[in-house]
Amino acid sequence: MSSSAMVPVATILLALAIAPGLAVGSSSVINATCAALKTFDYCQPYAYCVGVLSADPAAVAATDIHGMAAAAVNITATRAASTLRVITDLVQDLTTCRGHYSNMLQSLADVRVDLGAGRFRNASFKMIAKVAASPTGCDILLFEGNAHKDPFTQENGDNNLVAELAGGIIKLLTSK
């Protein structure tokens, strides 16, 4: 088959792939349900309602308001379960971050002892190797973790900057 003959075939296949989506968007039960919801003050806008319900096969297949309600409850349950998984992952990641920050505080106590005893090289090494790495490790864990959310981006960044600042100042002492 020549490439010019494949273009109409590809166009037909694309149209067939898109057609169910177009039909989905025009479900009269979805449209009627979403239009009826306009009378309630607490409901989402019509376009949101149509968009959410049209994306769900059970809502598209619903033939009455009862089927639409069941589909909406299932959509809500699916999203709530997804959010719970994110929260569970965040709790696990935050527990690990709590350990990072506990270690950071212990390392800072060691840095204070070294600094007070005049062991500037030890203090500088601990500040850079142990203290400054803790916020970054937490930030990376939260960003790359299963939840893919970092509620402490600003705090981790601020802690990293101030730790590096303190480390740099201590390093100045080692050059004296």
Image (tube, grey):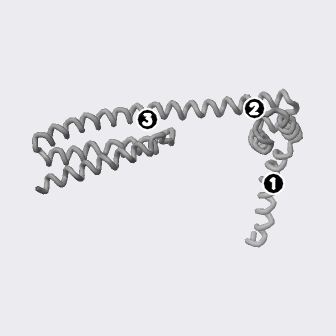
Q: Nearer the viewer, residue 150 or 105?
A: 105
**Residue type, label 3:** Asp
Q: Residue at x 26, y 43 (%)?
A: 130
Q: Nearer the viewer, residue 81 or 38?
A: 38
Q: Residue at x 31, y 45 (%)?
A: 133
Q: Are marks 1 and 2 in contact (CB under 8 Å)?
A: no
Q: Is residue 135 left or right of residue 2?
A: left
Mark 1 neighbour density, 10 Å: few (under 14) some (14–19) many (20 or more) = few
Mark 2 neighbour density, 10 Å: few (under 14) some (14–19) many (20 or more) = some
- For mark 2, what is the residue? 72
Question: Which label sits on residue 163?
Answer: none
Question: Which label sits on residue 93?
Answer: 3
Query: If you read the primary sequence from the N terminus, does the residue marked by circle 3 or circle 2 appear first?
Result: 2
Q: Tell me the distance, in whole angstroms, between the alpha carbons under discs 3 and 2.
A: 31 Å
Classify the position of the N terminus by image quarter: bottom right
Q: Residue at x 15, y 37 (%)?
A: 113
Question: Which label sits on residue 16?
Answer: 1
**Residue type, label 2:** Ala
Q: Position of residue 26 (x, y in %)?
A: 86, 46
Q: Tell me the distance, in whole angstroms, between the alpha carbons under discs 1 and 2.
A: 27 Å
Mark 3 neighbour density, 10 Å: few (under 14) some (14–19) many (20 or more) = many
Secondary-structure class at tag 3: helix
Q: Nearer the viewer, residue 107 or 142?
A: 107
Secondary-structure class at tag 1: helix
Q: Is residue 145 above or below residue 80?
A: below
Location of residue 134 (image quadrant): top left
Classify the position of the C terminus by image quarter: bottom left
Q: Position of residue 118 (x, y in %)?
A: 10, 44
Q: Is residue 1 left or right of residue 104?
A: right
